[in-house]
Amino acid sequence: MRKGEKGILLGIGLFVALGAGWKVLQLRDVNEKDYKIPFYSDAEPEIVERAGYLIKKYDCKDCHTLWGTRNVMQSVPAPPLDGIGSLKTEEWFYAYLSAENPQEILPTRLKPEYRMPSFKDMPEEDRRVLAKYLASLKVEDWYLDEVKKKEREKLYGE
Ligand code: HEC
């Protein structure tokens, strides 16, 4: 191989390497964008659809944020439901929705009109669908870790 040819091959090699590096960088960029929405549901489409209908019907979003949205006309300081399935189980949600007095399960300091209402009279099938859906609302581990870390910093200055 002559000197000139070597130079050309080296040039091509560099060009390919740079291109591959650029692609990797771009892919990382795309992934980083996805990471900005750390919430997802792993429920089957049928459950998602039925739960979506029930959440509207029972006005859950008058008080709760879900997928970052809620009824802006209301101002109840209820906990957001995004990612809640990473913290509690389907059985817990079912028991909570079925409770005569949900505050016995989850104590509250809110005024009575703001508190989580009892949904014990909701048809059992609907409570099952909602419990399944709530349990499917997950948050990415890295986000949960970050939130926990921030909480610790806030509470204990660690
Ligand atoms: C009137 C406002 C209101 C409505 C309507 C409401 N909730 Fe709640 N919910 C609350 C409040 C406030 C809490 C926190 C506990 C408390 O203060 O009673 C809560 C707690 C919860 C929790 C437990 C959250 C946690 O951090 O453990 C779940 C799950 C939940 N609600 C789901 C629902 C679903 C599903 C619906 C609709 C079927 C609904 N809520 C309707 C106000 C409401």
Image (spheres, rainbow, N blue to C red):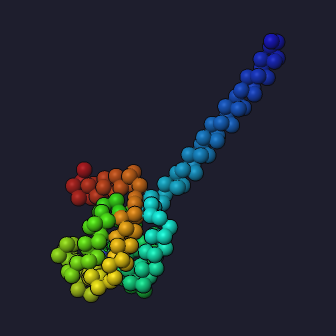
At a point 40% along the width and 64% down the height, the residue shown is 137
Q: Is residue 5 visible?
A: yes
Q: Residue 128 sits in which quadrant?
A: bottom left
Q: Nearer the viewer, residue 49 or 73?
A: 49
Q: Is residue 32 above or below residue 94?
A: above
Outermost residue on the left side: it is 104
Outermost residue on the front side: it is 125
Q: Is residue 77 visible?
A: no
At a point 35% along the width and 55% down the height, the residue shown is 144
Q: Quadrant of ligand 1?
A: bottom left
Q: Residue 60 sits in which quadrant?
A: bottom left
Q: Horizontally, is 1 left or right of 102 in the view?
A: right
Q: Horizontally, is 124 left or right of 99 in the view?
A: right
At a point 36% along the width and 77% down the height, the residue shown is 125
**Residue 88 appears at what percent x and percent y?**
29, 63
Q: Horizontally, is 134 left or right of 113 in the view?
A: right
**Residue 6 appears at what percent x and percent y?**
77, 17
Q: Is residue 53 above or below residue 25?
A: below
At a point 76% along the width and 22% down the height, the residue shown is 9
**Residue 99 appears at what percent x and percent y?**
23, 78
Point out the image quarter for the N terminus. top right
**Residue 13 appears at what percent x and percent y?**
71, 26
Q: Nearer the viewer, residue 13 or 101?
A: 101
Q: Is residue 102 above or below residue 7?
A: below
